[in-house]
Structure formats: structure tokens, C-alpha cells
Image (tube, rainbow, N blue to C red):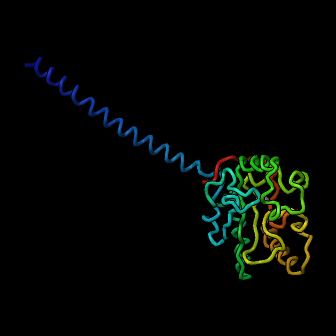
Amino acid sequence: MAGLKTKNLRVAFLSWKPVLMIRLNKYIFIILAFCISSSATSSELPAGFSKLKDIAPDIKEDIRYYGSHNFTGHTVPGYKSPECWLRTEVAQALKKAQIDAQVLGLNLVVFDCYRPQRAVLSFINWAATNNEATKKEFYPNVEKKKLFEQGYIAEKSMHSTGLAVDIGIKGLNFGTPFDFFGKESWTENTRTTKVAENRKLLSHLLSQHNFTNYPREWWHFTYKVAIDAPVYDIEIE
Ligand SMILES: [Zn+2]
């Protein structure tokens, strides 16, 4: 009887073991799936970054490198979603500038924020080609091969650190469109008083919150000085 009991117990255990393993595997799978999804969620943005819409949802987003209406004529590599990502302190500073703009009945609009390093590399490749399909709209008076030399395209961009933003004020005339490469875009070089006033207003709104304008692009601002800030190549998606 004892032997039978032992045998029965062994059979019972043997038949139960696979069920246990299946259950364990199921739980391991669930735990693994949770770990992967939670790590995927946490690796969406670089550490210390935020989505601008989560901090300042009133700021308009017109992310031009996501679509084809930009100087390359195509969606730029790294832009899988039309979102503005920035270092969190930069997004918070922009929120303050937006509050100031709203007092005047105005709204800020961003054209580019964090820019993956692969996008910067694609600009270098683009500049080396002979395709000039977008010349008329974006650089009619500058030779394509001189866009680097004249400072309109950089081989290393502060945008890749999440500390730079291309920005305007919705509905105001700034004299040129965003990313027009030419002297007409130099902040101090304005043809009409209205354009000069609008550029000064934009610079004022942002400088109040620690942004500095790049003198050759009325739309480009960098937050504080951050020479050693790390560069990222995480795709925006
Ligand atoms: Zn810029």
C-alpha cells in the first residue's frame, strides 16, 4: 500500500509538474513582458527630457522635419512622430514664455526641438548631393555647398542636446519663413519696422527666460550655456 501510495504520489507529482512549469512559464512571460514594456516606456525619451505638450499644451507644434515641407524636401530621419521633445527645464522655461505671450493675446509655435543626431548626419549627406529641388524656397541666394560655411547648417547641433528650439509667434510676420537660409533671416537685418518689432518681441519673450538667439536665424534659440551637454540619437516616436 505504501508502495502504491508512493507510486500514486509520484504519478501525481509527475503529472502536476508540467502544469506547474506551464504556470511558472506563464508568470515568467508576464513578468518579462512587463519588464520589456516598462523599459520601452522609460526609454522613449532621453533621461531628463519631456514632451512639450505635457508641460505647455498651449504652445503650437508645427514640426517641419516630420513632413516634407522643409529644406530637404522629405521627412528627416529620426522623426517618426511630429512631437517636440526638450530637456524638461527648457520646456518649463518655454511654458513661462508662452504665459507671457498669452498676456499679449499671442501664442508661441515651435518648428523644431530635440533633433536626433541621425537627422544632423542626414543634413550633411543632403548638402553633399546635387539635388536642388528646394533651393527656390529655402536658399535662393546661397550656394548649397556654402550652407555649412555660412553657418546655416551645423555638423553638430545644439538641438541634439534638447537645449535648442526653433520657434516663432503664431500669425506674426517675421520677414522670412522658418529655415530660410539667407541674410534676410539674420535677426537684426530687417526691411520693415513691423518685422523688426516682431523679431524683437520674440527675442524679448524668450530672453526673459534664459534663451539666447542665434543672430543668423531669427527663430533659433538656445537655453542658457551648455557646452558639454550630451548629444542623443534616440528617434522621436
Ligand atoms: Zn535651430
Q: Report how many numbered discs are placed on residues in the image.
A: 0
Left or right of 27 in this view: 181? right
- Nearest to the observer: residue 129 or residue 42: 129
Q: Where, by quadrant of the figure, is residue 18 drawn?
A: top left
Residue 183's x, y, as percent? 91, 65
What percent of the width, then of the height, locates residue 34? 45, 45
Q: Residue visible at 69% across and 60% down?
A: 68
- Reply above or below: 8 against 218: above
Ligand 1, seen in the image, is in the quarter at bottom right
Q: Nearer the viewer, residue 103 or 70?
A: 70
In terms of depth relative to the viewer, which is nearer, 28 or 132? 132
Q: Residue at x 63, y 60 (%)?
A: 82
Mark yes or no: residue 4 visible. yes
The percent position of residue 144, horizontal first and vertical second, equals 86, 54
- Quadrant that contains the N terminus: top left
Q: Residue furthest left?
A: 1
x and y percent of residue 2 in the render?
10, 19
Q: Who's the residue at 72% across and 75% down the image?
A: 170
Check the picture and name the quadrant holding the C terminus: bottom right
Locate residue 64: give its quadrant.
Answer: bottom right
In the drawing, does residue 208 fall left or right of residue 20?
A: right
